[in-house]
Structures are given as structure tokens and as C-alpha cells.
Image (cartoon, coloured by chain):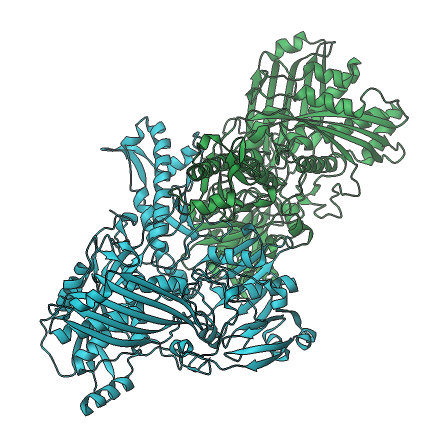
Chain colours: A cyan, B green
Amino acid sequence: MKVVGQELPRVEVLEKVTGQSLFGADVRLGSPFLFGKVLRSPHAHARIKNIDTKRAERLKGVKAVVTARDLPKVLYGRFISDEEYFTSTKVRTVGDKIAAVAAVDEATAEEALELIKVDYEVLPSMTDPLEAMREGAPLIHENYEEYKALPMVKGRKGNVCLHKQTIIGDLERGFQEADRIFEHRFFVPMVHQTYIEPHTVLAKVDASGKVTVWLPTQAQFPIRAAIAGIFKLPLIKVRVIPTEIGGGFGGKNSPTIEPAAVALAMKSRMPVQIVMSRAEDFQCANPRHSCHLHYKTGVKLDGTIVAREVESVMGTGGYYGSGGVIALRVDALACGPYRIPNVKIDNIIVYTNTASCGPYRAPAGTQITFASESQIDIIAHELGIDPVEMRLKNAVENGDTNPSIGRLENVNAKETLRKAADASGWGSTPRRKNHGRGIALGQWFIGGQPSSAGVKLNEDGTVTIITGVVDLSGTATSLAQIVAEVLGVRLDDVQIRTADSDVAPHSTISAGSQALRSMGSAAKYAAEEARKQIKEVAADKLEADANDLVLEDNRVFVKGTPEKGLSLGQVAQLSMTHKRGPIISANSYSQFPEQPAYSAHVADIEVDPETGNIKILRYVASQDVGRAINPLSVRGQIQGAIMQGLGQALSEGCFFKNGKMQNAGFLDYKIFSSLDAPNVEVHLVEREDNNGPFGAKGVGEPPIMPPVALIANAVYDAVGVRIYDLPITPEKIVRAIQEKDKG
Amino acid sequence: MKVVGQELPRVEVLEKVTGQSLFGADVRLGSPFLFGKVLRSPHAHARIKNIDTKRAERLKGVKAVVTARDLPKVLYGRFISDEEYFTSTKVRTVGDKIAAVAAVDEATAEEALELIKVDYEVLPSMTDPLEAMREGAPLIHENYEEYKALPMVKGRKGNVCLHKQTIIGDLERGFQEADRIFEHRFFVPMVHQTYIEPHTVLAKVDASGKVTVWLPTQAQFPIRAAIAGIFKLPLIKVRVIPTEIGGGFGGKNSPTIEPAAVALAMKSRMPVQIVMSRAEDFQCANPRHSCHLHYKTGVKLDGTIVAREVESVMGTGGYYGSGGVIALRVDALACGPYRIPNVKIDNIIVYTNTASCGPYRAPAGTQITFASESQIDIIAHELGIDPVEMRLKNAVENGDTNPSIGRLENVNAKETLRKAADASGWGSTPRRKNHGRGIALGQWFIGGQPSSAGVKLNEDGTVTIITGVVDLSGTATSLAQIVAEVLGVRLDDVQIRTADSDVAPHSTISAGSQALRSMGSAAKYAAEEARKQIKEVAADKLEADANDLVLEDNRVFVKGTPEKGLSLGQVAQLSMTHKRGPIISANSYSQFPEQPAYSAHVADIEVDPETGNIKILRYVASQDVGRAINPLSVRGQIQGAIMQGLGQALSEGCFFKNGKMQNAGFLDYKIFSSLDAPNVEVHLVEREDNNGPFGAKGVGEPPIMPPVALIANAVYDAVGVRIYDLPITPEKIVRAIQEKDKG
């Protein structure tokens, strides 16, 4: 192959590095627009007794005030059903939306918010899911039975909104067969996606009632559907124009402020922009679920795992949000990449008085992997088995069954683990005091979503690909490579355009590690159809059989007789008068089954036992990528995910007081920055997947999972203490060392 | 049919009437832009001795000055070959571009223009083509032989840049067979397209060198090709974003100020907007060619035309422009819609010192039709034959041959003429003093150009059509009707989007009366492909044969069993998991042969012999439209064309002094306004054309041709004087009456 597999810089790199890319808040129209602001609840739990917007409405410069009165009581999206867009009777989180205002400037909008008088009856609140689960805890949702749209109703009790139980084999017998049983509890706090660009939107409603929104989103088609659903419009009356996006990581898959901006634009008859502040975004967006995990695992003395019981208790925040998806993930992940014959999983989602949680890069993945990969490490040490050997002994293979996914294929768990172990020199390095080495293996499941793509041959033989998939992580470049490969053209002669929802072919969201697989398949099919058309036109001109033609070096020619050929520019010109007409194709792809991808990491660290500080000395990652369409992008994805995983391992977490986030800013919420970043050595396991385009697997999510457990394992290896709750802060390490020394 | 043939308001009507549509000069970016101005020659003919831009460059606020030094010597487009974009050695028209400046505001840009010092050696100039043709006339282009790209080189002599001769039959014998020979000379002055919106463009060049231009254009793909050609860029490095367009009429088919704006944007590294002033647009755009016509026609006493000799001398202005296309038209039109066995056409294009001429709605059509339909009227009167009978006697029929087009098909000349005559009560109205009635029959040829369209089914069953064709005259609505008809959906459930050149399927230009035929064919093919996909998905669900399914009322169901069916929304949802994937199609159409369409007009007028004022009392038009996809749009096109035709008949014309247009503004250049407009009764001749979608012919150009001759004929009928040069002003009528009374 000539283009696929090449390390190529991103096609949009120059605009990005020169600051020319247009991000959400940069959008300007040819006409003035209003500034929108959302009035949010200051209380985590309270009854609303009265909302008075009169004074705000009378303020000079205020053009519209909207509340629940202006929006129909809607159940929108697939998963959300217990949430009014604007709250009118009860607030359940700090940040619940009560009203929104649009004014001629930001200061007036802010003043108007202050003039809206809301009478609250404050209720007791809970942010921890275990607290919210307790008998007698105040009910966050009283009228539970009204929520008809919730996908799973079994197990509702008190604030528990979902309790799903999965049983495989015979758990009791499994534990009876075990030589030893290990039981541990773990906790992972809520973390935020910490994209650089907060949520922002500009909404406009034209004379015909057509709504246009400009926003950074990972999911233009679902956003279109959500807005259409809320405002009861046909899809063709809503246009979503995705701007460049300053990070999403799952946090920009669903609407937040968009309906407020649209309602304000409808009422004021002017365009309205809302830009969320950083604090608002931290407090009110859709962070990763906090999770309490109880892991009980039965093993034979040789390390064979025979039984596992898992209880996962996740706080979903004030509303169910995307809990359903998360719940499915827990089932798929609870056993880790290991073959366990007897399993019971209790998958519990609990309402709490925090922001409604949502997807974040590998939803549920970091939480479960922290527990699962910590515990297997503990067990290996307890049994005196090498952690790599322990994992290899139990690792899944093709044909094994996963509790949620079913039969597994394209399994490369062992290969990926061995590659990381080999590359890091596992087992061969001499021990040094306070130095430790950890390993962790992550398993993630990646499917594919319906997508379409268009390909056209321009009059000069250059090629354009049209999709609606937002480029978050280099997908545009990789898609261009796929099409260039199929059509035998140079990458420089291919342009890729992300169109808006009006014009774009139906596209998958840029999430779930499947954007490139899904859209890449559609683009490949479309390119193959264009190739067929090119051959058809060329065959007539060359008086050759279309089947004998090949495309290479921007030409089409008779196989074995390269001089008997045409440039693609000539073909494009010929097509104009050929019965075929201009060469263009659109093609679609519907779905792949969800199948696994693996990521194994090894880190060498040094722990300062006095301060608890951790220094990462070396970081080796291997990943099961199927085929790296663009190895440069793939490595970037892996390195980026590791940075986020290390942040969650070492420093991140949302901390609450009375439901109010106490560290809602980057000064207090410490992410892993480039200054903290170790050099990550990446090793790719390339065994073609029989589903993805050119054998590609998804790569974005798997590598965020190992770091959390890896650091815990390495800390244990270095200083002999085990941290069971994230983040693994210096304070916790020092305290644990002190307690170990005492004990 | 349910949607095709319905009288429907335009889909974009609400945006238009509320002023929300975004026209060219309204475009704003999220960042500042510069104001561009073009320095143009004040002389019609001069040698440039020196250009000094230094003082302008030093002016505060000036960000770029460009001249011929900054642009490669280019031959761009298909037809232009004798023109430098910026002139460096010789100016040939008032308005030739010498330099352009970009500055922070308009005043500074204007001041900078004044600071550019150009030394001229002024040469004698000519604006009339006969004057320019004379032996010894000063040469406008000295180095003729260098113009390699001119399509036709035969007949170059002096300022004559093209002399094409067409001979059919035996002219000499033809005239020998004639009982009488008539010889007349006619003159049609240069007229301007008088679109409401002058030329304007905003150009931006991004960090990767990609050029984006926003502009009102009829021809986004040719504009893209022209800019790419001039700046030697691949097509994917140029993006044309067509805005709404405030009229084009052929005047916005090719680049004018766009390359200047791009060159300024490249040099200043900022976006640059240029808005042409009204005077600049009148003086420097691409008006309709002035034309001297010599018509010599031989007839039998029974009215049969046996021979015709035509000499057409057109002034092309300073450059060849689109003369080639015009020349072909002269050949096709010279005989009018009549069967003439012996013909000689001398088709002469002459350089003059005026703006380079271009296409205007039915290029060459009004000029030739004025002569041809005036002369046939003269002959009918002279022979004592009713003008309608005279025309019917000679009118072409299927299978007749045209000197340029060849064999004619879909000919409805007689039907169209009869319909106008019948509707007007031709021959039945009593004569009143100074009242007159005229008739004229126009013939125009309409082909088709390569086009592609995309159709997608949205998740809720609504339908989107994607094209790149700019809507000038209701084509968008008609395209939506075609697709709605094919897919059996309501028009309200169809949206049509004109995308930009990056994203849009290759599209025809909105000119030549073929936009709807060409794009309609592509859209119909694409809709038919989408219908096939819908049936495929539905057939699997319904367990039916796809061939037994019908699409109607937004559903697909088994023929004869409407209850066994699915809504299109259900099909869209099913497609997401069906192997087919989301329903989307792209399809192309390449070309139709050029074939005729007819337009016959009858007007009753009253002439005041004292003032020469003409009052139009009644106006009846019939037109051969094949099938009216949207009769409301078709009538609008016909009425609009008649207004423009009446303007050219009665008042329009560019008048020059030393090459400078003396009436370059709407105060002095009188167009036919709504206050002048008669009520036009429109009668459609609907005989399906075997080429166009649903049998549609093109409708935009044919109706502009008859009015010019019609008024001349009616004036003759009213007061017995014949005007041979347009416009037919009150002064000319009064003078002709005075001369007749004298004679």
C-alpha cells in the first residue's frame, strides 16, 4: 500500500497551528447577535416555590427570558427521560437550569439573571452514591413511575434508578472450587473531560422557522435530532454546523445549552450565543460517573480465576443521563480481559445530587479497569505469580465468551500484553529501592455505527471526500488516506470536508473509538464505487475491459501496459460528455459487531516515601490496533489517552461540598499537562481486523484504561502500599506508608 | 402527478421577503477584513508608459497593492485569451484593471488609488464595431498572432477578431428564384444585464494556501476553475461559496474582481472584500454585444422564404470575451424559426474600445430576433399577407435543419404561435386610430450540461437534495418538486441545499435556460436510485418483492395493499441496521442535444403621435415549455424576461463618449420597472420534451427575444413608421412620423 500505513501529519495542521481554525465561540454572523446566559440552581436539592422573571424582562437590553413555560415538557434523546430541560418544580443539582436570558451584552445578561427571583425550599442533598442508596435517604425523584422513557425499570428502589444483575455459570460452585478468595473495595471519583473549549453555541432561527446552530460537537446528527425532538420540528428544519472542536472526549455528544439558545433565538427573533464559563462547564456538564466497586474473586493456587462477584455502584447525578450505556459497559468490562467461568455482576446506578453524568472516553472503562487490574495484581503478588504470567494464564482468546458482548473474535490480548512486557524488558531489570514497575492490560469493545460518505472526482483529477463526521483526533487525515489508497492518488490530491447536517451524508458520532472504522468503511465503499465509474469511463476511451484497468499514481491504465492510460484529470473531463456524467458516488455502511481491542502498559516509577511524589521514569504502551492507517495519528491518540489516564490516576477528581463542586477550575482541578508528561514509547500490534477498513480497529479509548491501575500496581511494587481509591495522591501514599510502617 | 405541475411558491420565499437572505456584500467573517478597490483605466485606448505604486504602498492603512507584477500572465477560462488580468502595457477600455489595493477602510483604499501614478500615451478609440472595422482604423490588439488560445483564428483582419461564414444551399440561385428581395439594416446597442446587486466578492486565503471566495455567482464551478487556473492551484485548493444572488442574467458567469481580491488576500494575508460600485459595474462588467445587422431576404409572392443573406457585426469590446459562444448563436438564430433553403451568414466579431462583452439572457438572441422578426413583419405587410400566416407558412417543423444546430426535434413553433394568436384574438379586433398590434416569434436552443446531485433520506423520513446549482429563478423549488414526485413525499418534507464547490456535486451553471433540465435530470436519477434503496430495505422488512412496492404519501407499501407498508421514517430507521446502511445516493447526468423552445408574443399598444409615447394596452405571451414543473415559476420567468425585453425595446442602451459610458447609473440608464409593467397574460404550450425531466424544456431565455421586434411591429401597425435601431424611443417615433409626413 502506498498511502495507508504512512505516518502523515494531519491535513488541517497549518490552520490549527496558526490559530486560523474557527472554534465554537469564534462564530460571527453578518448581523448582530445577543448574549445568552443560563440561570442555574445554586442548591443541590430544593423545591422551587416560585420563579419571578418580571424584573429581568423589564431590564433595558434584555430581549428574551425563557423558562419551562416556553419549552414543552419533553423527553428527548434515547436515554434521557427524567429531566425537564428547564426545571420548574424541583432542582436536583447545583446547576439545574431554571431560566435563560438573552441580552444585548454580556453584562446585561448577567444583571438580568440576578433579577430573576426564585424561591427555594432547600432539601438535604447527597453526592456519594452509597449515601444516596441508604435506607431512608431523601428521595431525589419522588414520582418515579412517571418516567416512562427510562429503558430499564427493573430494580428501581429509593434513589437506585437501575439495578441490573448478570449471572454467568454457578457463582457459588465457582467460589467453592476456588483455593483462595480475594475481596476488595475500590473507589473512583467523578472526573471531568476537561476539554480545552467549554460548551458554546450560536443559534439562529430564520423567517421560515428553520433553526441553525453552530457549535463544537462530536455528534452533529444526534444534536440535530435532539433539537428537532425538543422543538417538534422535522429534521430538515434544523441545521447543525459543527465548528472545529477544542476537545470532546465524550462530553460533547449530547445537547446542553443548545435548546436554551434556540428557545431564546425563537423568542427574541435574533441570533443568540451562549458560551459556558469554565466553572459552569465543570459544575454542570456531563462528567464521568463516580463509582464504588466491590470485587470478590476466587482463584486456584496456580492463578486460574474460577469465580468473580462484582458490585458496581455508580452515581449518575441528578438524572439518568447516559446511564444505560454505562451499565452495559460495566457488564462487558467487569471480568477484564480474562476468562472467568462463574460470574455475578450487580450493576447499580444511583441518583445523586451532582451533575448528570455522561460518557467520557471509555465510559466505565477507567473505573472498572482500576478495580479489575488492581485486584489481579494483588492476587498475583499474593499467590507469588508473576503479574504478566497471571494475566497470560487467564487472558481471553478467540471464541471465548464475554458476559455482555458474547463470543469474542479478533482477540489479541496475549499478543498485546507480551509486546508491552517484551518492549519494557519485563522481569529483566534489577530492583532499586523505591523504584517500582507496574503493568496493566485494558480491554475495550468497539463496534461501528451507520455512516455514509460521498466521493467526487474534480475536473482536474483531484478527489474530494464529503462526510459529516467531526475530526477530533486525525480521522480526517486517515479517511483521506483510505480514499487515496483506493483511488491510487497522492494524499495531496485528496481533500476531505466535514459538511453540516443539511448537506453531509448521515454520519456516525466522533466517539466510541469507531469514527474511523465506521466512516472509513463508508468512505472506502464510496471510493470503490467511484473507482468503478472511473474504470467505466476510461475503458470506453481506451477500448479496454474495465476489469483490466488499474488505478495508480493519479492515473488509470491497462494492467501491465502503463503507457496505455489516462490521467484522472482526463477521465474527469471525459466523464462530462460520457453517458456516465461527472464521477460521484455516495455509499453507506451500517454496522460492525462490537469486538475487543487491547492496550497494555508498563511503567517504571520512583516514589519518594517522604513526600509521596511519584516520578514516572519510563512508560511503554502496546496496543492492538488492527492496522494503523496513520501510525502517527495512532501514536498521538495513545499518548493523549495515557496523559488523561495518568491525570485520573494521579490527581483528578471533582470534589463537592453541599453538591457544589469545590475545584471547578484548572487551578484547583489538576490535569496532567505536557510538563508532567513522560515520554511514552508506543508499540503497535498490527493484526488485521476482519471488519474495519484495511483491517483497522478503533484506537481512542483502549489506552485510557490501563494507567489508573498501572500506577497503583507500580506504587505497590515500589513502596509496598496499595491505594484503593483514586486519585493516587502523594498524601494518600504517605499516609499508607505511615500506616504500613505502624502496622 | 402530485407535486410536479403544481403552482408552488418558492421554497426560500420567507427569507427573501423578510430580508434575511445573505447576499454577497453581506458576508462577514469572525475576523476583520480589508476593503479592496481596483484602479481602472480612465482612457478607452492608451499605452501605459509607467506605473508607480510606491506612494500608495506607503500610505498608512494600506496592506497590499497588486499589479500585473503579482499575477502570472495567464490565459484563463475557455474563451478568454487576449486579456491580461492586470494590464501593464496597454489599456483598451475605460475600466481596464491596472492595480488593486487593500486597505483597512474604504476611504484609505480610495486614497491609495489616487496615489498610484500611471503615465499614459492616449490613443484614438472606437466604440462602434463598424468604425473599428474600417480600413486603417487604429489597431486595438497589435500582436494578434500571440493569442494562441482564441478558439477561431480564421478571418482575423485589423480589429476583426472573428469572421465566420456559414453557407447552406445555393444563395445565388435562391435569390434568383425569389419574386421579391428585401434588404434592411438594423442596429442594437450594447445593453447591460442590470442585476440589482453589483459584483462583489470576499476572498480569504488560509494558512495552507487554500483560497475561499464568497460571492454571488451563477457559476461556482467555472469560477473555481478560473481562480485555480490563474493562481495555478489544484481545484481542491479553491473553495467557492455562492451567496444569494441579486440577479445575474449571464453577467455573473465568469470572474471579474475575484482574482484581484484573491491576489490582495494572498499578499496582505488578510481577507479582502471588493464591492463594485454601480458605475463601475455598468462601465466594466460584461454587457450584451452591440450589433449591426444586414438582412437580405428573398421570398415568393405567396410568402415562401427562399433565400437569406445575413451579415452580423458585433462589437466584442476590448477583448474577445465570450464571443465564441455568441458567434455560434448568430448562426443558429439568423434564419429565425423559419425553413430557409439557401442561406449565407457572415458572422463578424470586432474589437472595440468598450467593456469586453459577455452573455446576457439569450446571448445574440435579442439582437438577431429584432432584425429577423422585424423583417418578416415588413415582408408580410409588403406582400399583403397576414403576419401570423406568413410565419406559419415558413415555420420550422420536426425534422427541419438549422444551420448551426442541425436536425430539429421537439419543434412546437406553429403551436406556440397559434396559441398566442388565438389567445389575443388575432385578426378579430377592430382597428382604432394610433392603436397597433404586433406579434413576434422567438426561437431559442437549449441543451444540457453535466451535473450531479445527491439525495439523502433523513432519519425521520424527510428528504434532502444536495446540488451546487445556484437558484436564480425558482430552480430550487422545481428540483424539490421533481424529487418529491419521484419519492412520493410532500414538498414540505423535502429540503434542497445549494452547497459550496468543496462539498457540492459537480453542477451546471445557472444560465442557458438549462439549469433545471440538467440538474433536474441529475436529481431525478439520484431520487430514483434512493427510491430503489428504499424499496430494497422495505422489501426485506415487509417480506415483499421490491418490484411490487410503491412510494406514495410519504410511505412505501405493497401495490394494492396500502396497509402493508412502512413510513419513510421507518425505512430510514431500518436502513441504519440493514446491510444497505443509511439511504443516500449521488447520480450524474452528462448532456442533452441542443433543441428548440419557442415563445410567441402579441402586444396591443397605443402610440401618441405628438410625444411618441407608447402605452402597452395588452400583452399576451405563449411559450413552448415542454412541461411546467412549477407553472408559477414558469410564468414568473416569462414575465420577468418580457420586462427585460421591453426595456431593451423601449429605453435601454449604453451610450459612450470617448469610450466612457455616459449613462452608467439607473438615473440615466432607464430599465423597465414595475411601474411600467403591463399585465402579461401567459399561456403555456405543454408538449413533453423527450429529453428534460418529466418532459420539461428550459424557459428563461426564449421570452426575452420577442419583445424587441414585437414593439417595432406594433408601432408600425399603430402609426405606420418602422424603427430599425433600438431602443424605440419617443424621440425616434416622433422623428419618423415627421419624416413620413414630410415624405
Q: Position of residue A462 (x, y in %)?
A: 38, 44
Q: For the view shown, which residue lies furthest in the bottom direction?
A: A742
Q: Quadrant of residue B700?
A: top right
Q: Is residue A121 above or below residue A683?
A: below
Q: For the view shown, which residue lies furthest in the top direction?
A: B177
Q: Is residue A602 above or below residue B436?
A: below
Quadrant occupied by the C terminus of chain A: bottom left
Q: Position of residue A239 (x, y in %)?
A: 53, 54
Query: Measuring 82% from the left and 19% from the top, which residue is drawn there?
Result: B427
Nearer to the camera, B125 or A548: A548
Can I make out residue A442 in this image? no
Q: Quadrant of residue A58?
A: bottom right
**In the displayed structure image, the side of residue A650 where residue A66 appears, left or right:** right
**In the displayed structure image, the side of residue B268 where residue A9 appears, left or right:** left
Nearer to the camera, B569 or A306: A306
Query: Measuring 83% from the left and 29% from the top, which residue is drawn there?
Result: B736
Nearer to the camera, B569 or B688: B569
Q: Quadrant of residue A63?
A: bottom right
Q: Position of residue A196 (x, y in %)?
A: 41, 70
Nearer to the camera, A659 or B123: A659
Q: Is residue A393 above or below residue A607?
A: above
Q: Position of residue B395 (x, y in %)?
A: 67, 17
